[in-house]
Image (tube, grey):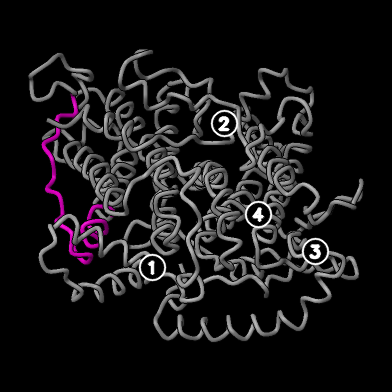
Amino acid sequence: MSDSASSFPGRALRRRSFLRVAGATVASSALLLAGCNDDDEVAPVTTNSNTLVLTNNTVGLLNYLYLLEQLQAALFQKVVDAFPSDFTADDRAAFIDLRDHEVIHRETLKYLLDTSVYDINVGTNVLVFKFDSFNLSTRSGAYTAARTLKELSVSAYNGISRMVLESKEQPTFQAHLKLLVKMASVESRHAAFVRDQLQPNSFAASDVIGTNGLDSSKTPAEVAPLIAAYLPITLDVTALIFI
Amino acid sequence: MDFLNLLARLADLSSETEAGAAPRRTALSRLGQAGATLLPAVVAALPRPAAAGVLENNTVLDVLKLALTLEYLESEFYAQALALPNAAAFFGSADNRTAIQTVATHESQHVALLQRLLTQAGATVPTKPNFDFTGSKNGAQAALFPDVFTSFDTFLKVAQLLEDVGVRAYKGQVESVQQDSLLLGTLLQLHSTEGRHAAHIRGMRRQRGAVVKSWVSPSDAAITTAGSVPAKAYTGESSSAQYTPAPRLIPFDTTLPINVGTPALSKEALLAKVAEAFDEPINAATATELAQLFIY
């Protein structure tokens, strides 16, 4: 949890920076909006095919979650493709479940985004994520990787509530909220499971649950640097406004 | 932390007393104002979307009271178990007891947090009800779980039921607080803590031989009698039907490339995975009915 983000000075700062960003948007939005009429949702754009720029609307948020689900699905698929030799039958079954759930989440978000999904034109050239910082050939390494991405996912889903949107975007965001929270529940179950497998009884340890019994919550600005090493692209979340 | 900010904001409202209004109305009003005050001015100044499509029509006060009832329930359940004269033997192992202690600590923290939210908003904090976790209403009827504090397996079944209901109930209230981003955030953070508890309790049961996954699955062995009130804890959880906001049924079984395993799953098995991938909400009435099983 980020204490500084919600202190009163912090809030005031964010309000000021929001105005700055809003001002900047006026100048830059002409580019993004080229070819769109006012009613179109602005799709996030991939500039020079190497930077994913997320927009401050529901499309941007869903693409952010889509990327996180892609990342998780890819990790679990990689483990399933070559199970660690010390995996038990239960470990294998669990990782297949985890892989399937993440693929289902990923494809759900892609379906929700429809033509606004950021990699609509990617064809078969799907992103190849970089997991070389993990040792996926051992049980411990596979669960460590799973725990890392699961905690990011839980805190990212919890953080979506803090998005600040224009009024016309609020109904769209809220219309998606219920489905997103259904996925968030399962992410927290996954997180507890993989933590326990790695270290018994760590399902809700004090590194993730605060002194008021609240699970962690992170904004895209907090999550982006934590996943940068796994991404073959640059993720630009500077436009997303979170409190 | 967000909730501290929330508390501070709610506290700021305490001077805005509406003379002559009934206590409940005053609290509602304040909580309503809190909803607007908490949002950044840029959002608060804008018109709210129509309520169409919102399933629950609960006030923020209703949401907090329901949440407190469920947290009282969970907190008291674990406290009673940990206070058993034969607690060490009852839990079977130090690890089991440690896990229950962890969960119990969170539940009492949740109670305290919700009590503070209500107090700071000027609402009367509901007192803790009387609980009978055998479900006999203090002997007034046949017990549902007569050996809840003598059989660790029964205890874990009830724990799983309470935790899964907690996860579902929070999810059911999300729409009722969605206008208030900080309260929504707090609810989501409470909700995912409950999800962790539920997963762990399920893992404990699995270690003891129960057929149950850490996530809610159609393959889980039932812990209650089909058609009974306790079974409502899982009613609808096996659904694989999910909808876009349009609303449009998401075509898991036809269009989406989700059948990626080798060998490919049967349609039935694939839809079971879809059911696992989404937890379903319950509404306030169902959550209350389930809580009432243990309240007398």
Residue A95 image point, x, y percent = 65, 36
Q: Chain of mark 4?
A: A
Q: Is residue B6 magenta?
A: no
Left or right of A41 in this view: A191: left
Residue at mark 1: B36
Residue A43 image point, x, y percent = 77, 61
What residue range appears in magenta?
B110-134
Asked if residue A196 is positioned above or below residue B17 in the image, the reply reads above
Q: Which numbered mark, 3 or 1, is in the foreground of this view?
A: 3
Q: Is residue B129 magenta?
A: yes
Q: Which numbered mark, 1 or 2, is in the foreground of this view?
A: 1
Element on which disc 2 rests: helix
Element on which disc 1 rests: helix
Element on which disc 3 rests: loop
Q: Which numbered mark, 2 or 3, is in the foreground of this view?
A: 3
Q: Are marks 2 and 3 on the same chain?
A: no
Q: Chain of mark 2?
A: B
Residue at mark 2: B276
Left or right of A90 in this view: B84: left
Q: Circles 1 and 2: CB distance less than 8 Å?
A: no
Residue A121 image point, x, y percent = 90, 52
Q: Earlier in the sequence, mark 3 or mark 4?
A: 3
Q: Quick one: label 4, few (<14), some, or many (20+) residues within 10 Å? A: many
Q: Earlier in the sequence, mark 1 or mark 2?
A: 1
- Give the residue type at disc 3: Asn
Q: Which numbered mark, 4 or 1, is in the foreground of this view?
A: 1
Residue at mark 4: A65
- Give the residue type at disc 4: Leu
